[in-house]
Amino acid sequence: MSSESDTEEVRRAPDVSRKASISAVSHIARRLSKLQARSSVVQPKNDLKGQSIQEIPVVRGRLEDLRPKVQSYILDCAQVCQPDKIFICDGTNEEERSLISEMEKQGHIKRLTHPSLTNCWLARTDSADVARVERLTFISTTNERDTVAKTRPGVHGILGNWMSPSNLSRELNERFPGCMKGRTMYVIAYSMGPLGSPLSKFGIELTDSPYVVASMQIMTRMGTKVLEALGDGDFVKSLHSVGVPLPTTRKIVNGWPCNPEKVIIAHIPEKNEICSFGSGYGGNSLLGKKCLALRIGSIIGQREGWLAEHMLILGVTNPTGKKIYVTAAFPSACGKTNLAMMVPTLPGYKFECVGDDIAWLKPDADGVLRAINPEAGFFGVAPGTSMQSNPNAMKTMMSNSMFTNVAETPDGCFWWEGLEKDIPIEGKILTDWKGNPWKLGDKTTAAHPNSRFTAPVAQCPVKDPLWEDPKGVPISAIIFGGRRPEGVPLVYEAFNWQHGVFIGSAMRSEATAAAEDRGKTILHDPMAMRPFFGYNFGHYLEHWLSFDRSGMQLPKIFHVNWFRKGENGKLLWPGFGENCRVLDWIFQRVEGKDVAVESPIGYLPKPGSIKVDDLDEPVNMDELFRIPKDFWMEEAEAIGRFYNDQLPEDLPEKMQTQLVNLKKRVRDL
């Protein structure tokens, strides 16, 4: 289907009269065609020469069948990027099979042949392209303060990267002209959110990576049905290139083209546009995910009165049959997917998954926050996932799934650290994520720490019946959390909405492998959104605070920490399925039960209100809930330094008041 020797009928791009579509590449396109520029975002290279747009064959689909806005965007980008072919994806199963087959022939992916797996594939990346690249991810606005807060003099901002429109124009112009020569430009019409939902948003991604197409087929609703639903409406323009035109002298590692020296991931909110270059890794190339669903999404949410958050959505049914929905915000690789698919150990409880990573929340007519999962797939961290930690994720990924940078067993199965019990490998020689022989005891890991599985939500055995409900599900509780090895109790509840926003703003967590930071440093990660803010964090907090108004029925807010350790360095809490015991207490608090006691940091569970009698091993509950005064005095000081450094002028007054109150309560301990 995607072969460069495709025998399908070839159609030339039509020379149509196009309405203006403001795009980051349209200025280049206009200069190339000697027409008037429609945008000043980028400046063209004067020496670029290539085939005219009329000479680029369309090997699947018909450009003339597309609406004018979509046509115009495709033609502008094709004129700049100069692909050999244009391929309009329809999202059918036949298309997917053909694309996968061609990728296999070209060595981009490998079939996993173990009898337990059906239609599962392995991709290995270049070792320089394995994670999100936060330092090269930018938001470009006319006013810098719209994107990032003004920091204290001499302090580096950590809550987003801004680039001026003129500088971004230069950077894009150095990269995109001619970048798709020798390659196919795939046109992916996609919907973030269920088709027909008033919360959903549409995008058009143009990419030269078939891996991106295959992954977007899992992660989004895409193809002809989206184009029909889009009609003449607006969409988020999403341009992606691996940055390796053909022919190339660059060494292609593992069949994975990338250009790590030139990576840039740019967001242009004023144009609802994303431009990503040089990386094929999912967080940088699946532009509907973090780029649209969180960065651009959060900006659209601020404009329209809703929230785009880095949160799972979980349905919880208690033994009496009552059901609530909760969202939870954890940094990447901190257990969101495990919680979203948890198998509860408490009798009578039922947990069902709406989504594991991103939530869009909007008030309904009654003031209830309702949430949708904008995604259609899971892009989960593989290491640590097992039948013990997340059996439902394991069952989900056994068919129609893509695995990236995991190891392979001799009999054609996936493998990663954490699967030692499920898939014993003693005495076996595996192929590691780089394609090299590997065995137990080697100094390197078999799978990359940020290796991933991409699997459809529809296959999840515990997917919630309402996971695609266009109205969304009503949220009763919001949970924040992260990796805190000391000082932070297992769970506590905010005093009120403002205090809850403060708790989220003050979140700190150990760094994880999902980004370039890999150490055990405790990082500030407010709302688990630090890498994903689309606009000024101070304004973001004001937006959250604005929901505390008449007519709203707001969820309760909680903080959890599964990762507190004792003096021996071991985890105090067993975690995984036993976390349902914490959700049981949260459920009781949502019902208004008197099972909490006030503390300086929030409401803690009353002794005995968390059910622990039948745990396999005893838990030191006193240590798990101890509030060390020295620790919390320093914690409050660290929050204050963070505010003073990052938000000296943009911190909402209500947040400063919350900090002052926390310090007073801790001093009185």
Image (cartoon, grey):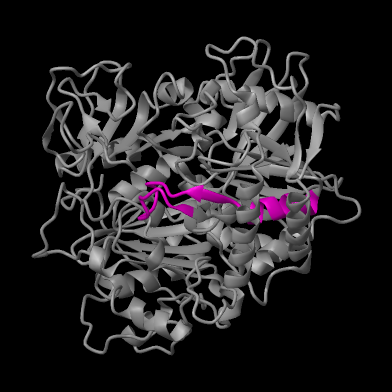
Of residues 641 and 482, the one nearer the viewer is 641
Task: Identify whether 31 is placed above or below 189.
Answer: below
Q: Is any part of residue 91 visible from this angle?
A: no
Q: Specify whether 115 is left or right of 168.
A: left
Q: Within the image, what quadrant is residue 101 found in?
A: top left
142 within the magenta span: no
Tell how many labels. Answer: 0
| Span colored in magenta | 497-522
Of residues 45 and 57, the one nearer the viewer is 45
Q: Within the image, what quadrant is residue 307 found in?
A: bottom right
Q: Who's the residue at 79% across and 57% down the image?
A: 661
Q: Within the image, what quadrant is residue 215 found in?
A: top left
Q: Who's the residue at 66% across and 29% down the image?
A: 315
Rendered-image quadrant of the N terminus: top left
Q: Residue 85: horizontal and vertical position, in percent? A: 26, 60
Q: Of all residues shown, which one is farthest toward the left?
A: 249
Q: Who's the residue at 68% across and 43% down the image?
A: 371
Task: Identify whether 321 is placed above or below 17.
Answer: above
Q: Residue 240: horizontal and vertical position, in percent? A: 36, 62
Rendered-image quadrant of the C terminus: top right
Of residues 516 and 138, the one nearer the viewer is 516
Q: Residue 134: horizontal and vertical position, in percent? A: 41, 61
Q: Is any part of residue 564 visible from this angle?
A: yes
508 within the magenta span: yes
Q: Specify whether 117 is left or right of 465.
A: left
Q: Of all residues shown, which one is farthest toward the right?
A: 550
